Image (tube, helix red, strand yellow):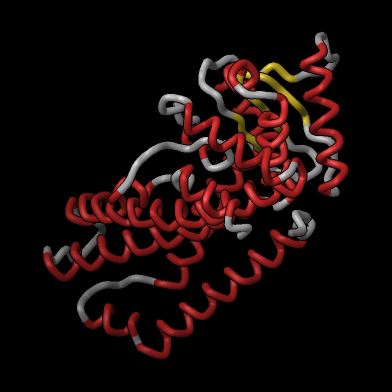
Amino acid sequence: MSIQGKPVMMRILLFLATNAAVLVLISVVFQVLGIEGILAENGVDLNLQALLVMSAVIGFGGSFISLAMSKFMAKRSMGVQVIERPSSRTEQWLVDTVQRQARQAGIGMPEVGIFNAPEPNAFATGMSRNKALVAVSSGLLANMSSDEVEAVLGHEVTHVANGDMVTMGLIQGVVNTFVIFLSRVVGHVVDRVVFKTERGYGPAYYITSIVAQILLSILASMIVMWFSRRREFRADAGGASLAGRGKMIGALQALQRAHEPHDLPGEFAAFGISGGLGGGMKKLFMSHPPLEERIAALQAGS
């Protein structure tokens, strides 16, 4: 499997063009179905096109700000110590391994760092494939063999090479847009049609919008996590390509042996290595597939 993704700018432009087309299509559907007219007849004086644009600006704006600040926030919140001048054989090996894998993946050399945590974990973040950060926990270095750590690094480098941070940021922007848009529409309808507010906004608008936004955000989280789980399988396959399938399987099995590795903070969880444990409804909100599924996928060669 090739782990080189499209250039970041091309990926962003294609994704934005696709979503701009979706917004235009929705606007056209509103016009054809006369939804705005139907709302107006029921006393809902709502400019759907303007609301859609406002929702997109807020939805994508928040997502891009989060993405742009991701590397800085990771260093601060996780206490990542970036290796600028290796001071030990382990640090030198980490830098050399990431450098080799980055060259294989066709990306710029990421910053390499270590954060202090007893649990085995690692993550990658950053807005650009050529200016990313790959960090591993002290617990991962202490509890895994060099082969297993090499596979984990390959997994994270693949996240960077595939542009997963940008892709997930854009997906988050799309779902944010529709959560904001639909919650405001529901709030307007309830306020005007049910509570008969004629001017301005009544309490029903704000209460209904907040409740609708919470419920829609839960559904949106399920959608984003589904995409995240798909990216994990690809990152595992990329790690197997860079380090070897046996090493990648061994790394995941080592995580299985660890006692419930702690999750990373939410904004970095989707690009970590371990993920959480769970089943049933909880599985729908997991950023990572269960480890047994990931191991089975590698063993099957998928």
User: Would you say residue 260 is visible in this rendering?
Assistant: yes
Q: Quadrant of residue 140?
A: top right
| Side (left or right) of 193 relative to 4 | left
Residue 250 vs residue 184, the one in the foreground: 250
Q: Position of residue 53 (x, y in %)?
A: 51, 65
- In this rendering, the answer to whether 147 lies above or below 271 is above
- In this rendering, the answer to whether 120 lies above or below 179 is above
Residue 267 vs residue 180, the one in the foreground: 267
Toward the bottom, the furthest residue is 32
| Side (left or right) of 15 relative to 41 | right
- In this rendering, the answer to whether 34 lies above or below 263 is below
| Residue at (51% x, 37% y) in the render | 269
| Residue at (53% x, 74% y) in the render | 22
Could you tell me which quadrant the N terminus lies in?
Answer: bottom right
Toward the top, the furthest residue is 87
Q: Position of residue 2 (x, y in %)?
A: 77, 58
Could you tell me which quadrant the C terminus lies in?
Answer: bottom right
| Side (left or right) of 33 relative to 251 | left
Residue 65 vs residue 284, the one in the foreground: 284
Residue 269 vs residue 52, the one in the foreground: 269
Q: Position of residue 13 (x, y in %)?
A: 71, 64
Q: Quadrant of residue 152?
A: top right
Q: How many numbered marks appear? A: 0
Toward the left, the furthest residue is 195
| Residue at (61% x, 28% y) in the render | 74
| Residue at (78% x, 17% y) in the render | 91
| Side (left or right) of 6 relative to 277 | right
Q: Position of residue 31 (x, y in %)?
A: 42, 86
User: Would you say residue 168 is visible in this rendering?
Assistant: no
- In this rendering, the answer to whether 38 lies above or below 61 is below
